[in-house]
Image: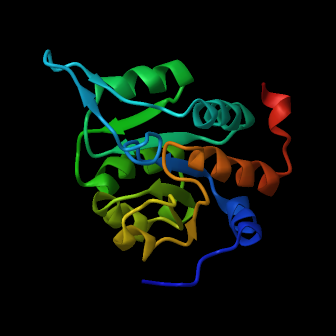
Amino acid sequence: MSTKYLTRAQLIRQFKTVKLLALDVDGVLTNNFLYVGGDGVEFKQFNIADGFYMKLAMRSGLPIAIVSGRYSPATDTRMKELGVKYVLQGKADKPSMLAPLLVELGIDCADVAYMGDELLDLSIGRKVGLPIAVKNAAREFKSIAKYITKNNGGEGAVREVIECYFEAVGKNPEEYI
């Protein structure tokens, strides 16, 4: 495992070239728990601050994409509520899910920051320019990450990273409330 990660200041500098923030869901936007009732209805716990900062970032001009290997109606509902336009779910091959969106947006993989936490995120993490692991990510994903958040997934890690984006581009998140 690599022991050399970007500092927060270095992450901020790297964010100056990011044109898309792509996020895994389970373990990144959630606390990695899934509640399933006897009727098959699932519930997930999303962090409110992460969602709020996602909205602010999108309003400021940063596109955000969800790239999840598992399809979830709960994810659809939450992302619709947040106004996330690009919700890609249901394929283990995350790079192939993301590729058409990159063409549509006219950006390269090198311009993507991706937050992940698990083995399923390795293939996409190896392709993007800025792979970011949440604090409680699997060691395998941490080994390819350039930055590791101070917060666990589902506990403000996404907000932490989006704060760095705002610093990088010199924008005040309060202006987008």
Asked if residue 86 is positioned above or below residue 122 in the image, the reply reads: above
The N terminus lies in which quarter of the figure? bottom left
Q: Where is residue 93 in the image (x, y as percent from the top left)?
A: 25, 55
Task: Give the colour scheme shown.
Answer: rainbow
Q: Looking at the image, which is closer to me, 6 or 13?
A: 6
Asked if residue 123 is positioned above or below residue 63 in the image, the reply reads: below
The C terminus lies in which quarter of the figure? top right
- Residue occupying the point 43% across, 42% down: 31
Q: Where is residue 168 in the image (x, y as percent from the top left)?
A: 78, 57
Asked if residue 170 is positioned above or below residue 127 in the image, the reply reads: above
- Residue occupying the point 27% across, 46% down: 69
- Residue occupying the point 55% across, 41% down: 64
Q: Where is residue 55 in the image (x, y as percent from the top left)?
A: 64, 30
The image quarter containing residue 155 is top right
Q: Looking at the image, which is closer to me, 2 or 98?
A: 2
| Left-right relation of 169 to 95 | right
The image quarter containing residue 26 is top left
Marks counted in the figure total: 0
